[in-house]
Image (cartoon, grey):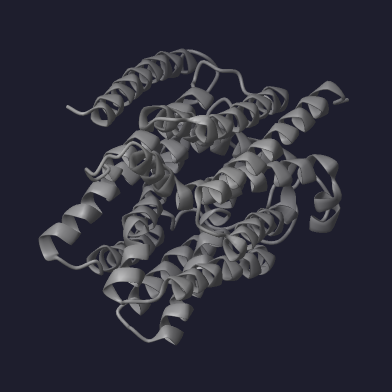
Amino acid sequence: MDSFTANVVGLCLINAVAIAANYRYKRSRRRALKTKTVEPVRLERARQLRWRFLFVYSLAACVEWIQGPHLYALYRYKKGISEENVSHLYATGFTAAAIAALCAGRIMDRLGTTVGCQFYFLLTCGSCCTLMSNRMPILVLGRAFGGTATTFLWSAFECWIIQQRQVQGFDETVLPLKRVFGKMTLLSSAVAICMGIASDALVRVRGSLLDPFLAAAVCSVVAVASITGLWRHYSDPDGTPAARGTTSELGPWELIQDHNVVLLASASAVLEAALYIFVFLWTAAFKSLQDKAGKVEPLPLGTIFAGFMSAMMMGSTLASAPWRTFSKQAAKFDMVTILLIASLSLTCAVLADSEQKLFWAFCVFEACIGAFYPTVSYLKSQAIRGNSRNIVYGMFRLPVNLLVLTWHLNAVEGVVRRHSAFLVFALFLLQFSLLFRLSVAFAP
C-alpha cells in the first residue's frame, strides 16, 4: 500500500468513527425529544422533508461530480481543441454563471424555487448533450448552459429547503438548518468519491470520454422526475411576505448594502474562488514536485482526489456535529477559524517541498471547505430573510464568478504564478478572518 492510499484509508476510518458517534448521539437525542413536548408527528414530517430534499440533492451531486473529472480531457484530447480555445470555453461558463447570478433570483421569485432546482438539471442535461457535437458554437452554447446551471445549483436548493422549513413551521428543535447544510456537504463529498470511481469505470469499460456526460444527462432526467414525484406535496410559497415567512421588510438592494451581508458575501467569494483556482492547480502542483524529485511514475490522482473529499467530509462532520450548539455568534467564530486555517494551509502548500506535505496542506484546506459550506449557509439563512432571499442568494454567485473569470483570463502556467495565486488568496483569507473577528467583537 502506497503512502497516499494509506492516508486515504486513515481519513476514511476517522470519518466512519465520527459519523457513527454522531448517529448514536442523534438517536439518543431523538428519544429524549419524544419524551418532551415535541409531537412525534411533527418530528416525522420534518424527517420526511429532510430525506426527500437530501435524496434530490444527492442526485444533483451525482450529476455535478460524474462529469467533472473528464471535461478538460474531452475537450483537449478527444475533440482536439487547442489549449487557448479550451480556456475560452471555460471562460464562457464563468461568464454565463456571472450573468445568471443577476437574474436567477428573479426567475425563482416568479416561477418558484422548485422550478429553479429543475432548471439546474435541465440546463445540465442540455450542456451534456451538446458535447456530442464537435462544432465550436454548439460547445460554447453547452458551456453557457453549464455555467448557468451552476448558479442554480448553489442557490435554488438552499432557498428551497429554507422556504419549506418556514412554510411547514419547523424550528431548530426539529430541523436544525446547520445540520441539514452539513449533511448536504457530507453527501456531496461521499458522492464525489463514488462518482469519480464510477466515471473512471465507464471510461475504461466503454473506452469513451463522452459516456460520463451521457450518464449525467440520464441522471438529470431521473432527478427532474424525482422532484415531480417527491416534492409534489411541497408547493412553493406565493409572493406575499406572509407566505414566504418574511421577518424583514428589507428589499434586496437594502440587504446588499448591509455590512454584515457584504462581509459574508465577500468572504464567501474569496474562499470559493480560492477553491475553484485550487481545483485548476492542484494537479500541476503535485506534478511540479514530482518532476523536481526526478520521479517518473504516474501520480495516483484518483486516490489523491479521494483523500481531498475525505478531508472535506471530516470538516463538514465537525462543523455540523449534533452535540454543538448553533447560533449566529458561534457560526461567526467558526468562520474566523475556518478562514484563518484556510489561509495557513495555502501558505503551507507554497512552502511544501514534498508530495506528502503538499497532500496534507491541501487536505487541511479541503477540511476548511467542508466546514465552510454548512457554516456560511447557516449565516446566510440568518442574515437574508423574506422575499429578497432568492435574489440575494443568486447575486452571491456574481463576485465568485467574476474573481475566477478574472484569474482565468490572466492565468499563465508556471510555479511562480501558481504560488502567487495561492499566496494572494491566503492573504485575502487572513484579512477576512480578522474582519469577522472584529464583527464579533463589535456586535451589538
The answer to whether residue 392 is seen in the rendering is yes
Q: Of residues 25 and 243, which is closer to you in this image?
A: 25
Q: Of residues 189 and 410, which is closer to you in this image?
A: 410
Q: Position of residue 56 (x, y in %)?
A: 39, 51
Q: Of residues 25 and 239, which is closer to you in this image?
A: 25
Q: Is residue 230 left or right of residue 404?
A: left
Q: Is residue 190 left or right of residue 395?
A: left
Q: Could you tell me which quadrant the N terminus lies in?
A: top left
Q: Could you tell me which quadrant the C terminus lies in?
A: top right
Relative vertical location of residue 320 with respect to residue 287 in this rendering, above or below: above
Relative vertical location of residue 153 with respect to residue 298 in this rendering, above or below: below
Q: Is residue 171 left or right of residue 296?
A: right
**Which residue is pictured at 66% across the width and 27% down the height?**
331
**Which residue is pictured at 13% across the width and 65% down the height?**
206
**Which residue is pictured at 46% across the width and 34% down the height?**
362
Q: Of residues 128 and 307, which is closer to you in this image?
A: 307
Q: Locate residue 438: give its quadrant.
A: top right
**Which residue is pictured at 55% across the width and 69% down the height?**
91
Q: Position of residue 364 (x, y in %)?
A: 48, 28
Q: Residue furthest left?
A: 205
Q: Position of residue 299 (x, y in %)?
A: 27, 43
